[in-house]
Amino acid sequence: MIKKFKSSLRIAFLSGLALLMVSCKAVVLDPKGVIASDERTLIFTAVGLMLIVVIPVFIMTFMFAWKYRASNSQATYDPHWTHSTLLEVVVWSVSGIIVAILATITWISSHRLDPYKPLDVITKPVNIQVIALDWKWLFIYPEENIATINYIKLPVNVPINFKITSDAPMNSFWIPQLGGQIYAMTGMQTQLHLMATNVGQYGGGSANFSGAGFSGMRFVASVGSQEDFEQWVSEVRQSANTLNDGEYIQIEKPSENTPVTYYSSVRPGLYHDVILKFMMPNANLPSRF
């Protein structure tokens, strides 16, 4: 009977695990960047520590249910038992130690993985300004003087400094395989520092519901060599599109599943004016604002 029970339990566990693997593509657990890798380690560490409590609880639950089943006449019956000092010490000591360890790890990692903290890398970073729109992402490369919609190109092993705002409802910028999410808010600027360590195509998008077109608010983060990045910049500069005030009026209008678009030049100060129009509505901004 016991062997049959253990066999059934093993089959149920493996079936559940297989179903989870098939139905869910856990990209967070397949990091391709230094920040995402550290975040995965943090997840595994926290889960491992909590399993120190969870696993024994599940094991004892099945053991107690089996030992004190109605058909087991050999089980000790002690309805007056109410307290065990040893049991109390073990339960609270283990829980307290785990909480203390988790608190320490959280404190250290919160500072080490601060999204505003630049990466400790000597390589010159690539700066990208991000504007969340309804329902698309506008990426401006201020030093290259180019822009894209729903697509970014990144050189591998080079730090990327994102400055993020919104010209629409609050949103959330996220590339799961490169690092954690951070919010994009109107009239404000947030920052995110990432660095890809593997060449490839990585999905990004919004992690915050922002309306009807939210599901199509996705983009591709393509990572290649430095030479690939420079060649791509040269190709974008050949585009016939330019991001001036008139063009921005059109792209800020709500649209769903917007295709990738390149802009060979960007009106200087556009990103900062998007922020200022909410912070200083009476300021002397360009006519567009």
Image: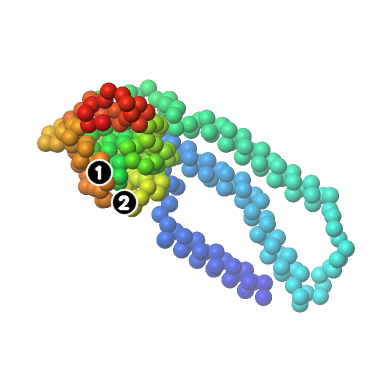
Q: Which residue is mark 2?
A: 213
Q: Residue at x 32, y 37 (%)?
A: 167
Q: Amino acid at mark 1?
A: Lys
Q: Residues within 10 Å of mark 1 (few under 14, many from 20)?
A: few
**Nearest to the observer: residue 285 or residue 28:** 285
User: Along the horizontal axis of the image, is 195 left or right of 104?
Assistant: left
Picture coordinates of residue 8 (x, y %)?
58, 71
Marks 1, 2: nearer the viewer: 1
211 vs 73: above or below: above
User: Along the horizontal axis of the image, is 32 left or right of 266?
Assistant: right
> Dividing the image into 4 quarters, which one contains the C terminus?
top left
**Nearest to the observer: residue 206 or residue 44:** 206
Picture coordinates of residue 172 (x, y %)?
40, 42
Q: Which residue is mark 1?
A: 253
Residue lying furthest right in this view?
80
Residue lying furthest front in this view?
282
Q: Residue at x 37, y 28 (%)?
A: 279
78 vs 38: above or below: below
Picture coordinates of residue 51 (x, y %)?
61, 51
Q: Secondary structure at mark 2?
A: loop
User: Along the horizontal axis of the image, is 234 left or right of 157?
Assistant: left
**Nearest to the observer: residue 284 or residue 216:** 284
> Dividing the image into 4 quarters, which one contains the N terminus?
bottom right
Q: Residues within 10 Å of mark 2 (few under 14, many from 20)?
A: some
**Nearest to the observer: residue 137 or residue 152:** 137
213 vs 289: above or below: below
Residue 228 visible at all: no
